Amino acid sequence: MDITHIQSALSQRDLDGWLFYSFRGSDPIATNILGLHEGHATRRWFYFIPASGEPTKIVHSIEREALDSLPGEKKVYLPWEQLHSHVRETLAGAKRVAMQYSPMNAIPYISRADAGTVELIRSFGTEVVGSADLVQEFEAVMRPEQLQTHLDAAIAMRAIVDTTYAEVARRIRDGVPTLEREIQDFMMGLYAKANLVTDHPPIVAVGPNSAMPHYSPPEHGSALLKRGELLLTDLWAKLDTPHSVYFDITWTCFIDDHVPDENARVFDVVRGGRDAGIAFVQKRARAGEAVYGWEVDNATRSAIAAEGYGDYFIHRTGHNIHEMVHGNGANIDNLETRDERRLVPNTCFSIEPGVYLPGKFGIRSEVDVYLTDNDAVVSGLPIQSHLIPVLSEY
């Protein structure tokens, strides 16, 4: 944690401070930014970083060491009245403070401070401002060495796609009965060989299962891969090194030596939406113009709707990517939420439209984009250009 950096960011935004609060691990954003290891914390704590001056930590009497790793004056409370008194005194003179709060819960990923705590702070005459932009600056911006981990993971993950599809083709040709779960296990073995880790195994979905965006093959009873069906693979992982950044992609293939017209048509629609989103970001970035998450979602979604499949695109276009696969920066979303955060340089996000036809099949094409000061660059090239007939291409 860099107090000087945080205080500079507060001054730039005309904020008097940033008030962190947690109860039983209720705010992982605070834990990450402050570099804490809460352990067995069972009582409320506050940590206030003013725009200038020394921070203040407020901790319970039985957990008075909870914030000892952080700089600043310590205030210890026992009865609840003393907690209120300490917070009131700490915020004296602070007119506007940031908290992990989102007005109208517009960005639920940021809404960590409960309504009652926000009411308490307001009762002291202090205005509570959402911390979404601050969080993005300190939780989503990549350092150069972090970008390199993302690019290195991209190379490894692209190779895993090709190796996996070659294995699928081999098993089908050799008549080896293969379940979705077995391909998932095969991919996890490739992760281990490439020194990759993940928070969850990849999605492997065949036939109608591919029409469920968050399908995961069960341990028992997953579907059999069959000739004449579509296979969707969604894989995300990062290098097994500290502070590495995820790479996250989705590819699809058809288990045959040719692709039926309907499947090819839907892939083309999805690809068109994906490429419209990429082009929109690149045009803005290269012109030095601001671009916001909700706008990219609109550009992508409009292209798919224009082809008559808008009702079958049932999730946001993308999400921030950082040390967590779903990071705390701006998402590409004007469907599930309206994410009005600006996409800022040195952040990474996915663009992953999909069309899902219930009971039939679903196609998603996911790429990762990272912003520089004057461009938007797609990582993990080449990206998928057509629906792959796996028996003729592998």
Image (cartoon, rainbow, N blue to C red):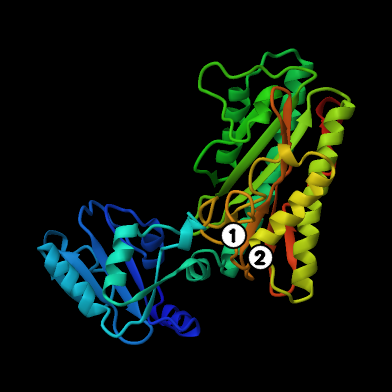
Residue under label 2, please give it.
292
CA gap between label 2 and label 1 equals 8 Å
Q: Position of residue 214 (x, y in %)?
A: 58, 35
Q: Amino acid at mark 1?
A: Asp
Which of the 4 image quarters holds residue 70?
bottom left
Q: Is residue 10 above or below residue 364?
A: below
Residue 153 in sight: yes
Q: Position of residue 341 (x, y in %)?
A: 59, 66
Question: Which one is in front, 145 or 34?
Answer: 34
The 10 Å Cα crowd at callout 1, few under 14, some 14 to 19, many 20 or more, is many
Marks 2,1: beta carbons within 8 A: yes
Q: Position of residue 211 (x, y in %)?
A: 68, 30
Element on which disc 1 rests = loop
Q: Residue at x 35, y 82 (%)?
A: 95
Q: Position of residue 192 (x, y in %)?
A: 55, 39
- What is the number of callouts on the image? 2
Question: Which one is in front, 81 or 191?
Answer: 81
Q: Is residue 237 left or right of residue 225?
A: left
Question: Which one is in front, 18 or 139?
Answer: 18
Q: Residue at x 78, y 51 (%)?
A: 302
Q: Amino acid at mark 2?
A: Tyr
Label 2 vs 1, first from the N-terminus: 2
The 10 Å Cα crowd at callout 2, few under 14, some 14 to 19, many 20 or more, is many
Residue under label 1, please give it.
339
Q: Residue at x 57, y 53 (%)?
A: 337
Q: Is residue 58 left or right of residue 263?
A: left
- Which quarter of the rendering shows the C terminus? top right
